[in-house]
Image (tube, rainbow, N blue to C red):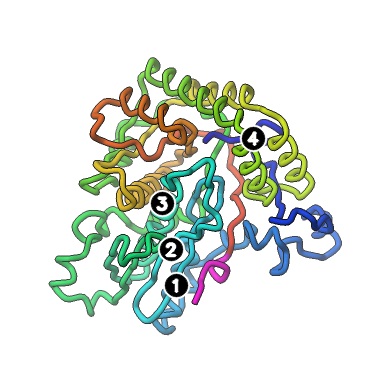
Amino acid sequence: MGDPTRVYESERTAGRTDRGETDERELDTSLLDTLGLDAFGRFSRRYKWVGDKRPWRVSAAAFPEEGTPVEQAQFLVRYAVLAPSSHNTQQWLFTVSDDEIRLFADTNRWLTVADPDKRELYVSLGAALENLLVAAEHFGIGHEVRYLPGSDSNHAATVRLSSGSERSDDELAGDERSAEASTDRRDSRLFEAIPRRRTHRGRYQERAIPREDLRALQEVCVEDDVTLQFVADPVKMGTIADLTARADRRQFADPAYRRELGRWIGRGAFGGSWLGSKVGKLLVTYLNVGRRQAREDGQLLRSTPLVAVVRTKSDGRRAQIRAGQVFERVSLLATVLGVQTHPMSAVLEVPSLRRELTDLLGRSEWSSQHLFRLGYAGGASEPSPRRPAEAVLVD
């Protein structure tokens, strides 16, 4: 969807809550900082759900060059957790053993109302997977990806790691990475962009993105079952804005949708103070702000120079994961080029409107998986909070 936080404060307004919603003892982060305390301490419920901004300060210099394969693999997860996700729910878990990293869906964080078919969950997992692979290649670690291995549908992917010298010709031939998203599409610029990438939810400047940059963005989509489609035609952009506005009004009319969104605003998914999160949660949960959200999202889309849609040949879990990989790869290159991105998923969360969008775009055999704005912003955005790698690594 667009940016629901704009309906009650600024782009950065949000906070935390917990399942029982009975603990009111936490204070505003700024006050705790003043007192020398930490609202994001390891025992804070807010920290448990959304983390804080410290994971963004990851440094490549800390990579354990002389460490064990497990220690190196665990370090890669520090970059994976910086990926974007729907409502910043961070719906991922990882296990590491020997030369493998396994990526799982954390269904406790699944948006059951906004994302009933789990499309956005798996797109989010794909973004985390892409960050992991970009980091692995930067540190000279080879990888082979297996999508959806085994019978557990929550097991999204297994990444087998190896040093370059250990990789046999047979491994290289069978590696889904080497045939498509090869090293020349994951160069050092993308790695350096991981901790700098931001979602910018405000208005973009009117200036167009240069053709050579658009070409570069499309060229990083090398998967044969995924395509990146740009929309710049004002008429089509207007239609997409109308579809998004209809989706906003329909979703916010549903009390269950508002409660779910309110929970994540309360948990601090969009950053900001504890007090702001409480106010935001109450407003979103108990007031139908759909008309205002629809108006704001419509204005954002109509004033945006470019919209992109990631589309896939099929509509299964593997396709959704790979769509997330492409989105993150495009977002990282956009960061390098000084271009901001902003997912606008509301229209895809309503099945009938998703079909209308696909009809508008043409080539109905290609499923629409992810829609986002691209453009130039006047200033920098604050990073959203993130759980550290230690919080998502499980035995």
Residues in magenta?
388-395
Task: Residue at 43%, 63% (x, y): give it.
Answer: 104
Marks 4 and 2, how far apart at CA: 30 Å
User: Can you tell which of label 3 and label 4 is closer to the viewer?
Assistant: 4
Give amino acid for label 2. Answer: Phe
Q: Secondary structure at mark 1?
A: strand
Circle 2 residue: 104
Image-based side of 303 in relation to 273, left or right: left
**Which residue in the rendered view is the most extreme toward the top?**
235
Task: Tell me where residue 305 appears, x and y as whole percent.
Answer: 43, 25
Q: Are marks 2 and 3 in contact (CB under 8 Å)?
A: no
| Residue 212 in the image: above or below residue 245 | below
**Which residue in the rendered view is the most extreme toward the right?**
35
The mark that comes first in sequence, 1 or 4, is 1
Give amino acid for label 1. Answer: Thr
Q: Secondary structure at mark 3?
A: helix
Q: Are marks 3 and 4 in contact (CB under 8 Å)?
A: no
The mark that comes first in sequence, 2 or 3, is 2
Q: Secondary structure at mark 4?
A: helix
Circle on res. 263:
none
Circle on res. 122:
3
Marks 3 and 1, how far apart at CA: 17 Å
Q: Count residues near mark 1 (Cα–Cα under 10 Å), then give few for <14, some for 14-19, many for 20+.
A: some
Pick whichever, 379 or 300, lies toward us. Answer: 300
Task: Residue at 55%, 58% (x, y): give it.
Answer: 108
Magenta includes 124? no
Q: Are marks 1 and 2 in contact (CB under 8 Å)?
A: yes
Circle 4 residue: 255
Marks 2 and 3, how far apart at CA: 10 Å
Q: Count residues near mark 4 (Cα–Cα under 10 Å), then give few for <14, some for 14-19, many for 20+.
A: some
Circle 1 residue: 95
Give amino acid for label 3. Answer: Tyr
